Amino acid sequence: MLQIRREKLKNLQDTNRDPFKNEKYDITAYSEDIKQNIEAMQGQNVCLAGRIMSKRGHGKTTFMDIQDSQGRMQLYVKLDALGEDEYNIFKTYDIGDIVGAEGEVFITQKGEISIKAQNIKLLSKSLQILPEKFHGLKDPDLRYRQRYVDLIVNPEVKEKFVTRSKAMKAVREYLDERGFLEVETPILNTIAGGASAKPFITHHNTLDIDMYLRIANELYLKRLIVGGFDKVYEMGRMFRNEGMSIKHNPEYTAIELYQAYADYNDMMTITENIVAYMAEKALGTTKINYQGKEIDLTPPWRRLSMKDAVKEYTGIDFDDIKSDEEAYEIAQKKGLELRKGLTKGHILSEVFEEFCEEHLTQPTFITHHPVEISPLAKRNPEDPTITNRFEAFVNTWEIANAFSELNDPIDQRGRFMDQLKQRELGDEEAQMLDEDFLNAIEVGLPPTGGLGIGIDRVIMLLTDSSSIRDVILFPTMKPVENR
């Protein structure tokens, strides 16, 4: 069948009908626009273009469905209208070929909006075979590898990415209207900072230095706050050399924003409002159904400290625990396997992740993380062992992380040094020391609230997608051998 398609192409080329010599086609209408405005469009002559998705021949008459960027349109093609020679050539066209069609809009006796074709031009020949109609392209691995085919044969996939575009546009609208400035910061970094994660390493030949793909843009954005921009944000790709799962892709889209003279409470308000705004703009509602679960994104969201969450879901009161050793013993009794050297704060976080996250289906802010796991967050004035930080959870997933930014350069240096010790103990995700960033906050960082939102996870919720690969057009895939 593949060889036959190539032979058809050769015949076209030999008769001076090479479709690949076409450079443009003047489109005057699209499928859905015609259907939505049929009263005005009926009887009009239009030109539209698209991919042949089906053909049904009846002697001197052929019905054909073509698919354009909006949807499908039926063409009614008659030998009398095209002429015998053109009609015979038209009959050789294959499913998957791209054609331009000129004709009159009409409604068939069965009530289907169609185009009565007067001229059909082959614009591009498909040399591959599309999956057949009823089984389609179902293998997830093949769908992600050949997203172009997935988009052609599974129209609902295209709608997910239209929803994604609307939601991302809504993020920018929300922030722009509130005086935030969109900026761009480096993707290639000499220090991988701003988050606890393992970076990708590359090499700059001219400078002869190793560099890192950014794991976060936090430290650069805070430098801009130091420089006098009071409200900044950046939405773009981040890169983390870590495991892959239904919630993790090595490169993903996140937004980080920073506001001078604001705190983590202000960031909570922005988080719940911006996610609700994304849903409203993309779906028209803040109440969504995800995999059979009803989730209400309407603000305000529940607020719960990490200690209170652990107490609520495990019965363990970390305020009653007096030492790291006692915390370690209690965690072991709960079945947690922990490495040596962890503090009470680390163990609190581990217990929360293991026993509490699974309960956070409805939107919930978990606040006041231990200082040990929050090297860039400001300490709580009443309890210096915790920070004024929160993570936002929906459907048991963390979708956002934020805090009142640490602006004490002496405290910040001490936190970085603690992170270096963690790296020496084998923690590859612990943060590196960034002397220039320390210099920046020594110049003076005003009280600042900072927020990061994982865009892909929010889009998963809005599109009812079970895997992050469903909302990334070209997810990271292991190469197929011998291709």
Image: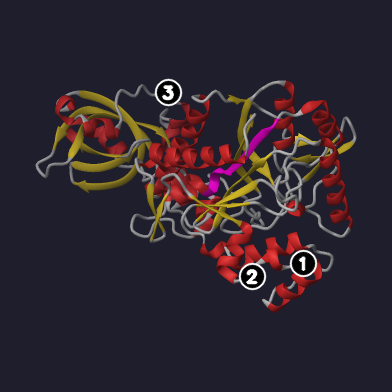
Q: Which residue is mark 2?
A: 316
Q: Sequence-wise, which precedes: disc 2 or disc 3?
A: 3
Q: Which residue is mark 3?
A: 24
Instruction: Give the farthest residue toward the left.
Output: 109
Q: Please say if the residues under marks 1 and 2 sit with CB atoms less than 8 Å apart.
A: no
**How far apart in space, not on screen, are marks 1 and 2 (Cα)?**
13 Å
122 vs 445, nearest the viewer: 445
**Residue drawn 72% across and 42% down?**
378
Of badges 1 and 2, the one in the foreground is 1
Q: Is residue 453 left or right of residue 124?
A: right
Of badges 2 and 3, the one in the foreground is 2
391 vs 80, nearest the viewer: 391
Q: Sequence-wise, which precedes: disc 3 or disc 1?
A: 3
- The answer to if 449 sits in the magenta stretch is yes
Q: Sequence-wise, which precedes: disc 1 or disc 2?
A: 2
Q: Is residue 4 above or below residue 181?
A: below
Q: Is residue 400 left or right of residue 69?
A: right
Give SS at disc 1. Answer: loop
Crowd band around label 1 with a 10 angstrom C-alpha radius: few (<14), some (14–19), many (20+): few
**How far apart in space, not on screen, are marks 2 and 3 (Cα)?**
69 Å
Q: Residue 25 location, x and y as percent?
A: 38, 24
Query: Which three-letter amino acid code belongs to the residue tagged 1?
Result: Lys
Snapshot colouring: secondary structure
**Residue drawn 81% across and 57% down?**
427
Q: Please say if the residues under marks 2 and 3 sit with CB atoms less than 8 Å apart.
A: no
Q: Residue 181 location, x and y as percent?
A: 59, 24
Query: Which three-letter amino acid code belongs to the residue tagged 3?
Result: Lys
Q: Which residues are magenta?
A: 447-457
Q: Which residue is mark 1?
A: 322
154 vs 370, nearest the viewer: 370
Q: Residue 444 location, x and y as percent?
A: 78, 27
